[in-house]
Image (tube, rainbow, N blue to C red):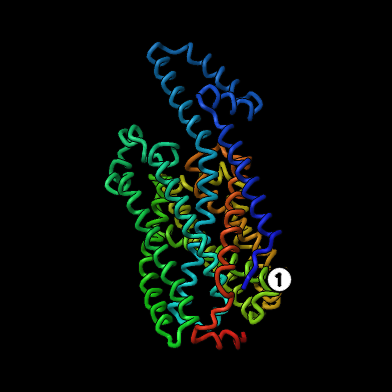
C-alpha cells in the first residue's frame, strides 16, 4: 500500500495556500467602476490611455451636437466593455485553471477506458495510477459545475451570449439561442458530468472487486461499460468543447475543435500518468513496472504531441488560407494580442517533444521524460489560456496574481486528491486476468 509522504502533503497544502492568496489578490484588484478600469489601463500604459482619451475629447468638440452624443455613447460603451474585460480577468484565470486540471482527470479516464475496451495487456500495472488520477474528476466536476452556475447567474461576463442586451443586438447569436441558453447549457453540463463520473465510479468498483474475485466476471463488466462509455464520451466531449470553450467566441466555430481539445486532453493526461509513475518508482513503489512501460508512455507522449500538432495546423492552415473574415478573426486576435503565448505554445507542445522524445533511448530516460513532461504540461496550460483569454479579456491579459494563483491552487488540490487516492487500494491490480502479460511486457 502506498503511504502519502508528509513532505508531499505539505507541498500540496502550501501550493493551495499560495494559490488562494494569489486568486484573492486577483479578485480584490479587479476594478468596480469604469473610471477605475480606465485608470488601471492608463497606469499600465504609462498614461498613454489618458492622453489618447484627452485627444479624443478635443476632437469631439469640433463636431456637431449629434456627433458629440454619438461619440459620448461610444465612449460609454467602450468604457463598459473595458470594465467587463478587467473584471473578467480573475474569473478567466480561475476558469483556465479549473478546466485544465479537470481535463487531465477526464483525459486519463478516456485513456483508461480505451485500454479497458481494447483489453490491452501492457498497462495493467498502471491501472491504479490511472484510477488515482481520475479520483480528481469528482471534486473537479463539482467545482466546474458551480463555476458554470455562477457564470449563468451573471457573476461574470465570460460568455457574452448569456447577456440579454448583447443577444438583442446580435443577429448571429439570436440564431443560436435554441442551443445557447443558460438552462439548456447547464442541463447539458450536468449530463456530461454525471455520465463521466458514473463510469469512473463503476469502473473503479469493478476493478477493485476483481482483485478479490475467483472468476473474471468483474473484468467482463468493466470491458462492457468501457466500450459503452467511449461512445458516450466521444459525443459528449465534442459537445463539451463547443459549450465550455468554443461558445466563448459565439461568432466563430471549427468542426475540428472537439478533436483539438481531445488531443490536448489526452497528451496532458498521458504525461501526468508517466510523471506520477516515475515518482512512485523513485520512492520504491511499483517494482514490477519496468522501463518498457515507461517507454510506452513516452511513445504516447510523443505520438499524441504529433497528433495535437496535426490538428492545430489543420485548423489554423485551412482557416488562415481561406481568409474568411468571420473565421480568421479568431487567429488574428491571438496572433496580434497573444503573439508570445500563441507561438510559444506551439514550440512547447510540438518542437520540444519532437526533438526530445523522438529517440528511443531518450524515451527510457526518466529525467528526460520528466523534463519533457513539465514543458508539455505548461505548454498545454498555455494552450487552454489561449483558448479562453482572448475571448474574455481581449488585449487586457497579463500573467499576474490570479493567473499564477489559479495554477498553484489547483495543482496543489490535484496533488492532494490524487496521492490520497493512491492510499485507498493496493498499487497493483493483481486480480486482472491479463496482469501476467503486463508483468512480462517487453517492448
Mark 1 Cα within 10 Å, few/some/many (few <14, many 20+)?
few
Q: Residue at x 43, y 53 (%)?
A: 322
**Foreground residue among 181 and 360:** 181
**Foreground residue among 391 and 63:** 391
Residue 256: x percent and y percent? 42, 60
Q: Residue at x 46, y 68 (%)?
A: 110
433 shown above or below 96: below
To which quarter of the image does residue 396 belong?
A: top right
To which quarter of the image does residue 158 belong?
A: top left
Looking at the rendered image, the quarter that the C terminus falls into is bottom right
Q: Which residue is mark 1?
A: 283
152 shown above or below 30: below
Q: Is residue 310 visible?
A: no
357 shown above or below 238: below
Give the secondary structure at mark 1.
loop
Q: Residue at x 37, y 62 (%)?
A: 195
Q: Is residue 420 visible?
A: yes
Residue 285: x percent and y percent? 66, 74
Residue 159: x percent and y percent? 41, 42
Looking at the rendered image, the quarter that the N terminus falls into is bottom right
Q: Residue at x 51, y 64 (%)?
A: 134
**Foreground residue among 421 and 259:** 421
Residue 354 left/right relative to 309: right
Residue 23: x percent and y percent? 59, 41
Count of numbered tags: 1
Amino acid at each position: 500500500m502506498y503511504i502519502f509522504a508528509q513532505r508531499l502533503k505539505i507541498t500540496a497544502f502550501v501550493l493551495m495556500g499560495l494559490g488562494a492568496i494569489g486568486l484573492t489578490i486577483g479578485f480584490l484588484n479587479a476594478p468596480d467602476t469604469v473610471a477605475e478600469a480606465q485608470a488601471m489601463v492608463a497606469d499600465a500604459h504609462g498614461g498613454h490611455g489618458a492622453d489618447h482619451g484627452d485627444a479624443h475629447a478635443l476632437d469631439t468638440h469640433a463636431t456637431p451636437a449629434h456627433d458629440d452624443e454619438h461619440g459620448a455613447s461610444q465612449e460609454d460603451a467602450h468604457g463598459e466593455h473595458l470594465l467587463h474585460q478587467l473584471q473578467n480577468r480573475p474569473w478567466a484565470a480561475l476558469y483556465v485553471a479549473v478546466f485544465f486540471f479537470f481535463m487531465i482527470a477526464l483525459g486519463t479516464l478516456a485513456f483508461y477506458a480505451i485500454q479497458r475496451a481494447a483489453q490491452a495487456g501492457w498497462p495493467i500495472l498502471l491501472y491504479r495510477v490511472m484510477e488515482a488520477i481520475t479520483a480528481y474528476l469528482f471534486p473537479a466536476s463539482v467545482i466546474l459545475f458551480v463555476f458554470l452556475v455562477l457564470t449563468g447567474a451573471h457573476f461574470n461576463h465570460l460568455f457574452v451570449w448569456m447577456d440579454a442586451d448583447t443577444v438583442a443586438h446580435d443577429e448571429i447569436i439570436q440564431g443560436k439561442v435554441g442551443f445557447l441558453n443558460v438552462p439548456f447549457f447547464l442541463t447539458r453540463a450536468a449530463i456530461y458530468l454525471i455520465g463521466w463520473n458514473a463510469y469512473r465510479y463503476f469502473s473503479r468498483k469493478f476493478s477493485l472487486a476483481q482483485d478479490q474475485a475467483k472468476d473474471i466476471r468483474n473484468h467482463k463488466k468493466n470491458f462492457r461499460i468501457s466500450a459503452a462509455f467511449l461512445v458516450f464520451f466521444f459525443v459528449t466531449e465534442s459537445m463539451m468543447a463547443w459549450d465550455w470553450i468554443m461558445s466563448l467566441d459565439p461568432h466563430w466555430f471549427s468542426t475540428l475543435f472537439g478533436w483539438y481539445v481531445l488531443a490536448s486532453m489526452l497528451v496532458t493526461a498521458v504525461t501526468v500518468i508517466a510523471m506520477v509513475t516515475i515518482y512512485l518508482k523513485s520512492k520504491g513503489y511499483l517494482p514490477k513496472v519496468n522501463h518498457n512501460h515507461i517507454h510506452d508512455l513516452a511513445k504516447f507522449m510523443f505520438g499524441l504531441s504529433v497528433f495535437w500538432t496535426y490538428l492545430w495546423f489543420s485548423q489554423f492552415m485551412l482557416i488562415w488560407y481561406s481568409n474568411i473574415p468571420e473565421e480568421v478573426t479568431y487567429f488574428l486576435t491571438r496572433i496580434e494580442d497573444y503573439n508570445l503565448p500563441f507561438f510559444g505554445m506551439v514550440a512547447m507542445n510540438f518542437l520540444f517533444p519532437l526533438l526530445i522524445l523522438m529517440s528511443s533511448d531518450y524515451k527510457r530516460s526518466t529525467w528526460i521524460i520528466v523534463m519533457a513532461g513539465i514543458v508539455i504540461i505548461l505548454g498545454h496550460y498555455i494552450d487552454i489560456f489561449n483558448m479562453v483569454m482572448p475571448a474574455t479579456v481581449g488585449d487586457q491579459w497579463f500573467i499576474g496574481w490570479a493567473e499564477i494563483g489559479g495554477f498553484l491552487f489547483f495543482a496543489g488540490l490535484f496533488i492532494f486528491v490524487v496521492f490520497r487516492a493512491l492510499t485507498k487500494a493496493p498499487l497493483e491490480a493483481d486480480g486482472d486476468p491479463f496482469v501476467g502479460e503486463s508483468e512480462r511486457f517487453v517492448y
